[in-house]
Amino acid sequence: MRRLLTAVLTCLGITAGALVAASPAYATVFQTYGSGVNVRADAYLSSAVVGTLSGPTSIDVDCQKQGDLVSNSDGTSSWWAHVPALGGYVTVVYVAIPEDQLPGVPVCGDGPPPETGDITLADVQAMFGSRIANPSIVQTGLPSLNQAMRDANINTPYRKAAFLATLVHESRLEYNIREIGDTRVYGGRGYIQLTGDFNYGPAGQYLGIDLLGNPDLALSLQWSAPIARWYWTVARNINPYADNLDMGRVNAAIGYPAGAEDQRRCDSFKSALQYLTGSIPAGVICTRPSKLKGDTSHLTRTQFDTLAKNGSGLG
């Protein structure tokens, strides 16, 4: 089908190169085929679906990147076309060309947007306003928090926006906060509000400290930020959800049941994105998949990852 459609377009004098004049200077026009072709936030089958092509469509492609291998009856390709107008990527398998890689299209820069520098108190105040209730405590903790972000590769606007939006709702970005009214031995503490012996134990083992024996270490300037980094990257693998602008899955990964809080956190995510990038990108996802609407806090990382996977559709 890919090659047949390409031949038909060529016979009609309609080629990708001939269509460029109608497109922005940076883009090249291609034709897709098939129906129900997914547009994904990144070049992976696990990435969030940000749109669907109901039928054959002309797409303006500015770059391409390698990702997951996709096959159909006409061929196989690991290349994905980035379509800025759709806010995502379309697998090249459903682009009407004879090749498995788009001709004449540059390779996209790897990963999400470029790295940014350390976060300042002025930055978080601009992002979150009155949620920064104790600026002096926030200021004291920022050097350790920035180090934790570097260690966790939370180094792009999308990742920083998701991480900081999460922490401002968990702890107001205060490293030494205890969950109000929580008198449990292993109740919420610190930036990420570490909760439960099932988290205190593994976090302490990973960091080489006795959190089970001394849970208040989670409130300390030395350990609060590393614990947040551990949860973000070891207990869960949250950066890819941030890369996909999927705040729904970020919230589910934190481990509380779905509700009105999800939208509040997504609004903070958007506010941070607006500040860090100058706009709110298309494709932000605020809602969770149905399988992740309950309390996921007791799940292992493998169990959570299994429930969090996307599915359905072409590509």
Image (tube, rainbow, N blue to C red):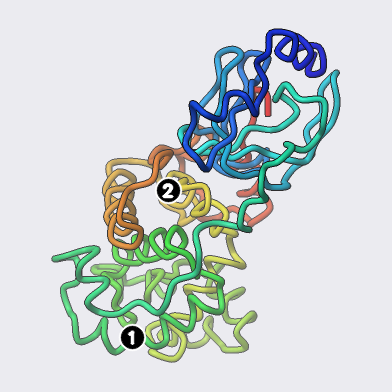
Spatial separation of the CA atoms under disc 1 and disc 2? 24 Å
Residue drawn at x 57%, y 89% is 209
The answer to whether residue 164 is above or below residue 294 is: below
Mark 2 secondary-structure assignment: helix
The answer to whether residue 163 is above or below residue 151 is: above
Front-most of residues 157 and 310: 157
- Counting from the top left corner in percent of width and height, residue 130 is at 13, 66
The disc, 1 or 2, on the residue closer to the chain's N-terminal end is 1
Q: Which mark is residue 141?
A: 1
**Dot 1 alpha-carbon crowd within 10 angstroms: few under 14, some 14 to 19, many 20 or more:** many
The answer to whether residue 297 is above or below residue 156 is: above
On the image, numbered disc 2 is attached to which residue?
247
Front-most of residues 5 and 169: 5
Under mark 1, the amino acid is Gly
Q: Quadrant of the C terminus?
A: top right
Image check: 311 left or right of 268?
right
Residue drawn at x 54%, y 36% is 83
